[in-house]
Each structure stands twice: as C-alpha cells, then as structure tokens.
C-alpha cells in the first residue's frame, strides 16, 4: 500500500535446437524381382523410417525472473527523504539496468552460443513416383499382364535407355548436339534411375529442427528433456534419454550470498539486489554419449547479493544481473 517502484533481476533460458535428419527407405513396387532380373541383393526390402541428430545449437535468452521482483519504497521521513536520489533505469522487461542516472547504459544483447557438428547435409527431399509403362489407351491389355511381365517390360526400357546413353556419349548419331548433349544425357540417366527405383527402391531425406526451452533451477544439475530413438526420433517412450548436465565452474560459491528467507522476509534500507551469475559447463548427452558442450553464464544458478546505493552510480548487466560499473560520488 506504499508508493514506490518495482524492478526485476534477470533469469536465463536455454534454447536448444536439434537439427534432425529423417530418412525414409521406400521399397520399389517390383522389389521382389530385383534379385532375379537385376542380379543384385542391394535393394530395399522393407519400408523404413529412421531419425538421426545432425547438430545441436545452443542459445541463451533472457527474461525477467518472476521470483526475483523487488519493490523500492520512496522515503517520506523528513530526515531521510533527501538521502537517496532515486534515479532508476529499467529495460523493457522491467530488469534493472542502472541506478543513479547513468547515461547510455544500453541493454546488452543476449549471449548466443552455437555448437555444430562438423558434418552438414544439403540434399532436399523428393517425391517417390512410378513411371507408367503403357499408355492409358492400353489399360485393358495392362490389366492382363502379370507383375513379372510388367517388370520385364521395365527392364527392356532400361536397356533402351542405356543404349541411347551409349550412342550419345560415343557420337553414334554423327549429329552435333552442342551443349544440349549434357542435358540429354542427364535426362536419360534420371529416367533410368526412376525405372531402377521400381526394383531397388528409393531413399528420401528431410532436415528439420526440434526446439526445447529449458529454465535452469538451483539444485537441479541434470535435466532429462526427452527420449530419442533411431526409429521414433524425439518421443516419451522409446530410446535413450537426452539430458542436460550443468557443471558449476564459477567462484560464486565463495561469495556470501543471501538466503531465500533473508530475501523474502527482511526489509533493507538504501540497498539494491543484484546477481553474481554462475559460470557453468553445459553438456548435452544422448544416453552416455556427449553430443554438445559449451560454457555459459546462468544468472539464477549464481548468488543474490546487496549493494548500498547512497551516493552511488551503478550499471547492471541486464542479461545476468551482475554489476558492470560502480561510481561513488
């Protein structure tokens, strides 16, 4: 019921982007004749979908901590009302950025950390389709053909395409096609591959991103975010756990930090709260395999402290809550 102002300390959110490759093995319509007609065992025998983690990107975001909001009461006592000049600057989230009318205390941008595996993938997914063997006018005769007869027809088409390819590259036609010969050769090979896919099958790949947001909490050094399997991708049932470990490497444990009770129950005069963030090593593991690692500053895993504000000019890091500069008048 007293007049005053509110300010927050910041907290950090970790945004983890997993780049996933989804691979679909699609068997050919006439795969049962691949061994007999193509004399090969290298063909897709069953439809199958698999997933793999290609890379991990880690970003740190900042927001106002809803558990760390404080109220500054403007003094009405004749003795003390002039003792502190209340010049408070906040960012758009309500996080304290300066005290004492410090100019140009621009809000820092959030730290961004990116980890990528050394391999990359650029192939775009394509659709699986079959090349018609006969014209629509011959549908009646096509219905009478067995699958083996149709398969033999496709083999004959492949032979014709290979002969046409040979004639083009050896100049059998004695026609100067110029630069168009490369295009013609490419079209023949593409059509041959489509016919072959009816026997050996096709593999399509798709790349997509799956994102998780994690808010680190004090006392929770390991967080399971999901499970991941080759057959299901990210899911809640099958596969090995994907988890995050935080290893504290900071000196914040040596600082006399305030207890939760002290923060919530004690009234402080002419003082401001600030944070000493924790320096942590963040590891992303799939089962026991480490797939990413980086060093981060996490404000809420550090300590909350007090600083006197009498005749002080202060600048705070709005990403971590740490003091950046102190000027005593």
Image (cartoon, grey):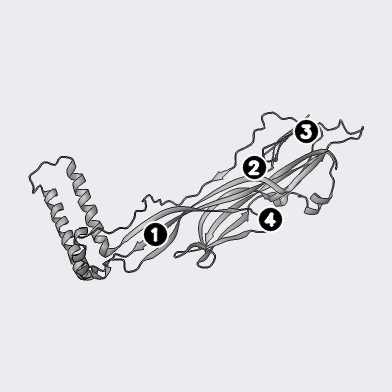
Residue 324: quarter of image = top right
Name the residue nearer the viewer: 219 or 66: 66
Vertical position of residue 13 compared to residue 72: above or below? below
Which of the two discs, 2 and 4, labels the residue nearer the N terminus?
Answer: 4
Per the model, the C-alpha gap separating discs 3 and 2 is 21 Å
Vertical position of residue 267 compared to residue 238: above or below? above
Which of the two discs, 3 and 2, labels the residue nearer the N terminus?
Answer: 3
Q: Nearer the viewer, mark 3 or mark 1?
A: 1
Residue 312: image tag: 3
Which of the two discs, 3 and 4, labels the residue nearer the N terminus?
Answer: 4
Q: Residue at x 42, y 53 (%)?
A: 207
Where does label 2 land, which residue? 319
User: Which image quarter is the N terminus in?
Assistant: top right
Where does label 4 land, which residue? 218
Q: Are marks 3 and 1 in contact (CB under 8 Å)?
A: no
Where does label 1 land, which residue? 23
Residue 121: image tag: none
Q: Residue at x 91, y 35 (%)?
A: 77
Q: Nearer the viewer, mark 3 or mark 4?
A: 4
Per the model, the C-alpha gap separating discs 2 and 4 is 17 Å
Position in image of residue 206 (x %, y %): 40, 54
Position in image of residue 36 (x %, y %): 21, 71
Q: Residue at x 47, y 50 (%)?
A: 116
């Amino acid at each position: 019921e007293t007049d005053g102002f509110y300010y927050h300390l910041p907290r950090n959110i970790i945004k983890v982007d997993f780049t996933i490759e989804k691979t679909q093995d699609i068997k050919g319509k006439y795969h049962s004749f691949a061994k007999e007609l193509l004399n090969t065992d290298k063909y897709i025998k069953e439809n199958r979908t698999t997933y793999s983690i290609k890379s991990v990107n880690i970003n740190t975001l900042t927001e106002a901590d809803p558990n760390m909001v404080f109220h500054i009461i403007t003094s009405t006592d004749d003795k003390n009302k002039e003792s502190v000049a209340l010049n408070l600057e906040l960012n758009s989230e309500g996080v304290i950025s300066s005290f004492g009318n410090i100019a140009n205390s621009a809000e820092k941008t959030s730290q961004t950390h990116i980890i990528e595996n050394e391999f990359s993938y650029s192939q775009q997914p394509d659709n699986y389709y079959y090349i018609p063997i006969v014209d629509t006018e011959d549908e009646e005769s096509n219905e009478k053909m067995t699958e083996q007869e149709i398969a033999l027809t496709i083999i004959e088409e492949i032979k014709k395409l290979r002969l046409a390819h040979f004639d083009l590259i050896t100049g059998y036609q004695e026609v100067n096609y110029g630069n168009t010969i490369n295009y013609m050769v490419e079209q023949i090979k593409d059509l041959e591959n489509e016919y072959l896919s009816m026997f050996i099958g096709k593999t399509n790949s798709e790349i997509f991103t799956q994102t998780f947001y994690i808010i680190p909490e004090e006392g929770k050094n390991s967080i399971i975010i999901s499970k991941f399997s080759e057959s299901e991708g990210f899911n809640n049932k099958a596969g090995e756990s994907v988890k995050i470990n935080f290893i504290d490497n900071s000196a914040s444990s040596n600082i006399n930090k305030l207890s939760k009770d002290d923060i919530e129950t004690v009234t402080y005069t002419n003082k401001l709260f600030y944070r000493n963030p924790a320096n942590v090593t963040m590891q992303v593991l799939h089962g026991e395999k480490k797939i990413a690692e980086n060093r981060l500053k996490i404000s809420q895993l550090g300590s909350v402290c007090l600083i006197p504000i009498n005749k002080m000019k202060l600048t705070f890091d709005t990403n971590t809550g740490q003091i950046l500069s102190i000027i005593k008048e």
